[in-house]
Each structure stands twice: as C-alpha cells, then as structure tokens.
Image (spheres, helix red, strand yellow):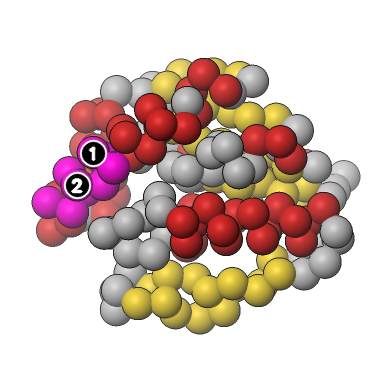
C-alpha cells in the first residue's frame, strides 16, 4: 500500500506522516520517505531526478524489492549517504512533490494539506532558520509551478486543513 502526502512547504506533511506511521506500525510494516531527502538541492528540486527516483521507489515497492538511493546532504549541498528503502506493507511518501503524476497510479490514498504558502514559509523559517529565506522564496515559486503543472491538489483523494 502507498499513501502520498503533498502540499506546500510547512503545511504539516511530515507531522501527518509520522502520526500515520505510529498509528499503523502495530499492524503493518511502515516506512516514511521524505521528499527533502530525495531533492537534488535548491536549484531543481522537482525535476527529472525526483520523478525518476520516485518511479524507482514505487516500482521496487510494488515488486517487494529493496531500493537504494542517495539521501541529499543539505549541509554540504551534495548527495550524501545511501538511503535504503525496504519492502514494507505501507509506504508513506511525504513532501512537496510526493503526489505527482509519477506516483498517482500506484498510490492507494493521495492526501493534500491545504495551507497558504506564506504561513508555510513562516513555519519553515521558524523551524529551519532565517538563513534559508532567500532559498525558500525560490523554492516556493518552484513549488507553485510544480503543483500547477502536476494538478496535485485536484488529484488528491482527501484534503486536510494545515492550520490544525
């Protein structure tokens, strides 16, 4: 089973994924994959690298085979350590880009978290520091374009209010 959780940066996707993981872990094997680990830096987070990685993750999950990718190191701004994705009963893909077209045919449930991008930006800066503000402003524009081109919000099965 695959669940995707998408929405703007700072909407609460990670929090919801962690809650769901804890709720299901007594009945199922669960792994949460964070899009932040899969992006290829600030310049092109939603490009072909992310899409291809997601296609490989989904294909491996459906084949019940492990998949190894590289987790991005944001401190060094380069690909970092290996990230092993084990075969599990429930795979939760969370983050901006998780609900893109490449994952939709395989997702059993697609969740969108509604939140004004400026509120999300404030949350991200409070969490990660104001030193990334310029980069986050660029990210927000890329996220806006990505969500529009992909129609992610409209394709979701469920919409959740990110203010709670």
| Contact between labelled residues 2 and 1, with CB atoms less than 8 Å apart | yes
Q: Quadrant of the C terminus?
A: top left
Which residue is tagged 2?
Answer: 138
Residue 86: give x, y in percent of width and height. Answer: 76, 66
Residue 22: give x, y in percent of width and height. Answer: 69, 45
Residue 4 as seen in the image, left or right of residue 24: left
Residue 127 is tagged as: none
Q: Is residue 1 magenta?
A: no
Residue 80 as seen in the image, left or right of residue 53: left
For disc 1, the neighbor class at 10 Å (few under 14, some 14 to 19, many from 20) is few
Q: Secondary structure at mark 2?
A: helix
Name the residue rendered at 67%, 59% in the picture: 57
For disc 2, the neighbor class at 10 Å (few under 14, some 14 to 19, many from 20) is few
Name the residue rendered at 31%, 33% in the picture: 144
Name the residue rendered at 57%, 23% in the picture: 155
Say if 114 sits above or below 51 in the image: above
Q: Secondary structure at mark 1?
A: helix
**Magenta-highlighted residues:** 134-142
Q: Quadrant of the N terminus?
A: top right
Q: Quadrant of residue 108?
A: top right
Which residue is tagged 1?
Answer: 141
Residue 35: give x, y in percent of width and height. Answer: 49, 53
Q: Quadrant of residue 31?
A: bottom right
38 and 127: which one is in front? 38
Is residue 105 in view? yes
Is residue 160 in view? no
Residue 89: give x, y in percent of width and height. Answer: 84, 50
Counting labels gives 2
Q: Magenta stretch mostly in which secondary structure?
A: helix
Say if 53 sits above or below 9 in the image: below
Name the residue rendered at 38%, 73% in the picture: 73
Q: Quadrant of residue 80?
A: bottom left
């Amino acid at each position: 089973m695959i669940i995707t959780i998408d929405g703007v940066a700072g909407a609460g996707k990670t929090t919801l994924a962690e809650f769901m993981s804890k709720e299901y872990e007594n009945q199922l094997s669960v792994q949460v994959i964070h899009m932040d680990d899969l992006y290829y830096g600030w310049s092109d987070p939603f490009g072909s690298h992310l899409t291809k990685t997601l296609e490989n993750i989904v294909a491996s999950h459906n084949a019940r085979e492990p998949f190894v990718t590289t987790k991005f190191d944001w401190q060094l701004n380069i690909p970092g350590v290996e990230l092993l994705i084990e075969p599990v009963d429930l795979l939760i893909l969370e983050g901006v880009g998780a609900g893109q077209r490449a994952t939709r045919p395989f997702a059993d449930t697609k969740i969108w978290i509604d939140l004004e991008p400026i509120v999300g930006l404030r949350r991200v800066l409070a969490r990660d520091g104001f030193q990334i503000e310029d980069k986050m402003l660029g990210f927000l524009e890329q996220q806006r374009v990505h969500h529009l081109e992909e129609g992610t919000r409209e394709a979701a099965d469920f919409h959740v209010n990110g203010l709670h």
